[in-house]
Image (cartoon, rainbow, N blue to C red):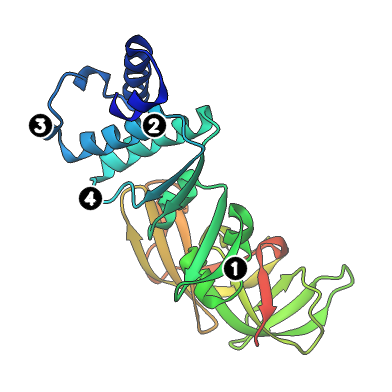
Amino acid sequence: ELPLWGRGLGRRERRARALAALARFGIEPLARRDAATLSGGERRRLALARCFATDPAALLLDEPFDDLDAAGRESLARDLVRAIHETPVAVALVTHELRQALLLADRVALLRGGALLQCGPRDEVLRHPVDGGAAAAVGMSNWFEGRVAARDADGLARIELGSGAVLRAATPLAIGSAVHVGFRPEHVKIDPDGADPDPMGEAQIEELRSDGVVVTARIECAGLRVHTHLLAGRGLGHTLQKGSRVRLSVRPEHVHAVPAS
């Protein structure tokens, strides 16, 4: 109740707001406990409950999930997302973990050397990073050099990568332009039948790594190292093996091209 003391609230209202804030983060049963006896995760929830009890206009959260185990991070993230959506508070989250940012943020800002590199709506930054460093920061692990070789009748650019692989992209860059091309791993399609209209080329599985939920595949395609994600235990995530020959494709709307300069 201490943060509410100086706001002219009566004891009953202070008590009610404090208990509501504790309940929001699932720790109302701990209201009578000495804070010194709480676990690290419980103290983190208490700190957030104390912040939300005052109905702040804005909060700065610096690594709020740091030092929590995986289950604790998931549980606290759910409660924090709900609290943010239930209140008008604006939240700035500082984190080195991309997944945490994606769970909470609707806008993402990237910093490099203390300077702002890129800022915008979350999906815009994820799909259209300004350069290779930004791409790596937002999980766009497929980033290659190429050249705009031609333009199709439908206006899409045909981009040849240095290795001979070809991608189509919706970009206004002129024919002959040197470009950097990126696409997210979840947008790489393994096309066993070769029926996709946007083939990238034939490829071979180099490595498969599974955490029990997602299989990360590293694939050699015309000398490039391409990464994609598959669900573990089902479909291609279950049947593919190291050395398997496959075909890859990436739809034009998922290919991001920027001038090489």
- Mark pair 2, 3: CA separation: 22 Å
Q: Which residue is mark 3?
A: 37
> Which residue, as the protein is rendered here, is positioned at the far right?
153
Left or right: where 10 falls relative to 191? left
Mark closer to the observer (2, 3):
3
Q: Amino acid at mark 1?
A: Pro
Q: Which mark is residue 67?
A: 4
**Dot 3 crowding, Cα within 10 Å, few <14, some 14–19, many 20+:** few
Q: Amino acid at mark 4?
A: Asp
Q: Quadrant of the C terminus?
A: bottom right
State how far apart marks 1 and 3 are (Cα).
Answer: 45 Å
Which residue is label 1 attached to? Answer: 129
Q: Which residue is mark 2?
A: 79
Nearer to us of marks 1 and 2 is 2
Residue closer to the observer: 260 or 239: 260
- The N terminus sits in image quarter: top left
Marked residue nearer the N-terminal end (1 or 3): 3
Query: Label 2's element?
Result: helix
Which residue: 40% across, 31% down? 52
Question: Could you tell me how far apart the alpha carbons at marks 1 and 2 are, in whole angstroms?
Answer: 30 Å
